[in-house]
Image (cartoon, helix red, strand yellow):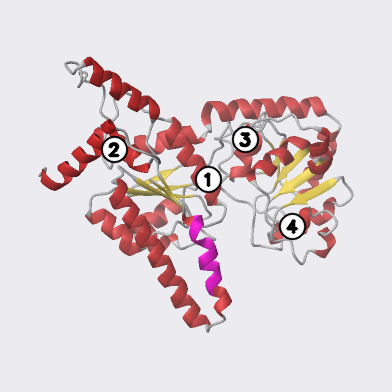
Amino acid sequence: MVVLPMHGGSLPIGRYCATALGRLGHMVDVFEAPLFKSAFDGLKELRVASADLDHLENSFLQVVSSAVMAKTEAMQPDLVLALAQAPLSRQTLSRLRQKGVPTAMWFVEDFRVFQYWRSFAPYYDFFAVIQKEPFFSELSSIGVKNVMYLPLAADPEFHRPLEPDAVDKKRFGSDISFLGAGYPNRRRAFASLLGYDFKIWGTEWDGAAELDAVVQMQGRRISPQEAVKIFSCTKINLNLHSSVKGDRDVVPGDFVNPRTFELASCGAFQLTDNRELLPELFTREEVTTFGNMDEMREKIDYFLEHPEKRREIARAARKRVLSEHTYEHRMRDLLQKMVDIKILRPGESGGPDPLSEADPELRSRIKELLDKYKLSYGVGFEDLVFHIRRAEGRLDDLETSLLFLDEWKKQYKK
């Protein structure tokens, strides 16, 4: 089961993880925390004292966390995978541990900026992160032993090259663009690019008056589908990592953001600031970098004049993503690591056909049922029942019999 956050940058990443796990052959259910967001936001409209609001918000999140627990008890998953800021309380995580349900979090945020991990990381059985030292040491100091470096990725079936039509080219196209939130370092940096055909997409650009003319769509949130169009319609996609420090344009950092992989997967050319962990993910022939604003402007001018060079680099970057940096790669690595350290059991392999001596008509009926739910012949009984319970419409006699057998097992089998 994949537990999504109610909102934020890790929300689409959670959906990509769920999709990737399904492609790898796993049965996946998703806890849709975004369904609760409007009610959570509505608490602020009560206009109560801040202390009362804090209490209400914490109580609300406890209810959502209890809903995760209820869904877990119904599904009985082999693993609960949470994305950063997923609504899982320490009490719920403790209950899951007591019940023997393995839990993992993929913390896809900067540990220096978002430090809530200190309170929650010890309650997870496995903690995957997008940074290395000193994060590993800090996690160890609070008792977190099972840690894995797991960089971000892309979904190449979603993040793919497009051939935009004339309307999209006019709407989304430009020589240079940036998609992301208006962090202080970006506001400072982009003020020096106003002489170019430049567009800014994304939220939190309020108050940057000098950039008003280039901020698109009144600074609203851009959907993932729109993002792919922007990437494809832009000659040079700027990828300046965020920093809360407003005194520097380009701030040294370690982790590589999701935009790096998504741009590469779309076959879009990007200019990215230097990152400590980038060289082990992409070569200089795949992603072009800069260390300061002078170098950024120099490379902008060069690559605007050399479109074929842009296309060559973009092609190489996409090839690298397809071979090493998809969410299927990441989910496979995460699960394998959890198997290696014995948090998860390896999957059952093959074995004799359990219906080899069954009546041919029954075999045929079961084959039809598996095809209906798009399941393989080796699926377990519990997994088949899970799919039947989720389906809508009238049950046939075989489905009814299987549900009856499941209830019998719960009541009488010890």
* Tag of residue 291: none
- What type is the residue that disc 1 sits on? Ile
Front in this rendered view, residue 9 or 67:
67
Secondary element at tag 1 = helix
**Looking at the image, residue 164 lies above or below residue 237:** above
Residue occupied by mark 1: 13
Q: Say whether residue 310 is left or right of residue 395.
A: right
**Can I make out residue 223 in this image?**
yes
Q: Main secondary structure of the magenta part?
A: helix
Q: Residues within 10 Å of mark 2 (few under 14, many from 20)?
A: some
| Picture coordinates of residue 373, whole percent (x, y) | 38, 31
How crowded is the residue under tag 1: few (<14 C-alpha within 10 Å), some, or many (20+)?
many
Residue 395 placement (x, y as % from top left): 33, 37
Where are the magenta residues, as a range? 34-43
Q: Which quarter of the figure has residue 185?
A: bottom right
In this view, the mark in front (2 or 1): 2
| Residue 385 image label | 2
Q: Position of residue 176 (x, y in %)?
A: 80, 43
Q: Residues within 10 Å of mark 4 (few under 14, many from 20)?
A: some
Q: Residue at x 51, y 66 (%)?
A: 39
Give the amino acid type for the residue marked by disc 3 in the picture: His
Q: Is residue 195 above or below residue 55?
A: above
The residue labelled by disc 3 is: 159
Q: Is residue 189 left or right of residue 103?
A: right
Q: Which amino acid type is shown beneath numbered disc 4?
A: Gly
